[in-house]
Image (tube, rainbow, N blue to C red):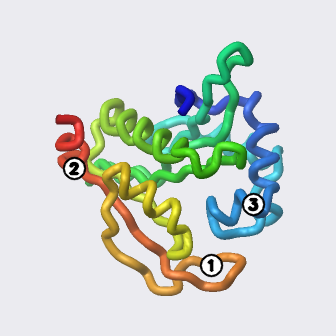
Amino acid sequence: MKEIRLRYAEEKDLDDMAIWFADEEVMYWSSGSHGETLFTREQLAERLATMNSLHSGRWWMIDVNEGAKGWRAIGRVTFRNYEPVVHAVTIGITIGNKEYWGQGYGSKAIRAFVDLLFRRYNLHRIQLDTFQDNIRAIRAYEKCGFKQEGKLRQSFWTTKGYQDRVIMGILRSDWERKQE
């Protein structure tokens, strides 16, 4: 597996993100929805401009080292919904470049992102949610130390209809044990 890095998303990344957000298959596995119902390049630019702090959230690009070709963006990780009382955030991931699906890059990026968030922001908890049919993502999150904490019945709308929302989380204490 090639080396990855996480870096802040920039305006130069909007073209890649717009392609990913227009791909129905990418968006189904990322959010359960059709690509065209999400964001245009212009809407992504507006969101990127506001996503720049702990309180508003932030986007990071997932880059893969392609050797002599340099770094290539293959997806993004995000956090949102900072809860200052419990020091928690909600995260998400999109591997937008389908050439990299099923090779462990999602797990590798989540591990790196969890490390970054616990170290940089001194969080107590990181959480996420997905839908019940997203088995590949659930397994990847579990490999990274997330535990299933509950389900909200039929609270996630996908293009295939209502599905259960799977709530997962990792605590700082869980993460610290994995560091030993």
Residue type at mark 2? Asp
Q: Residues within 10 Å of mark 1 (few under 14, many from 20)?
A: some
Looking at the rendering, in which quadrant would you find the N terminus? top right
Marks 3/1 in contact by CB < 8 Å: the verdict is no
The residue under label 2 is 174
- The answer to which of 133 and 121 lies nearer the viewer is 133
Picture coordinates of residue 149 (x, y %)?
31, 70
Residue placed farthest to the top in the image?
A: 68
Residue under label 3 = 38
Name the residue at 64% across, 63% down.
29
Amino acid beneath label 1: Trp
Query: Is residue 43 or residue 169 the one in the foreground?
Result: 169
- What mark, if any, has residue 157 been given in the picture? 1
Location of the C terminus (image quadrant):
top left
**Distance (Cα) linking label 1 and label 2:** 31 Å
Q: What percent of the width, then of the height, locates residue 174?
A: 21, 49
State the residue at coordinates (82%, 51%): 40
The mark that comes first in sequence, 1 or 2, is: 1
The reply, left or right, for residue 156 in relation to residue 43 is left
Please indicate whether residue 62 sits to the left or right of residue 49 in the image: left
In primary-sequence order, the first of circles 2 and 3 is 3
Dot in front, 1 or 2: 2
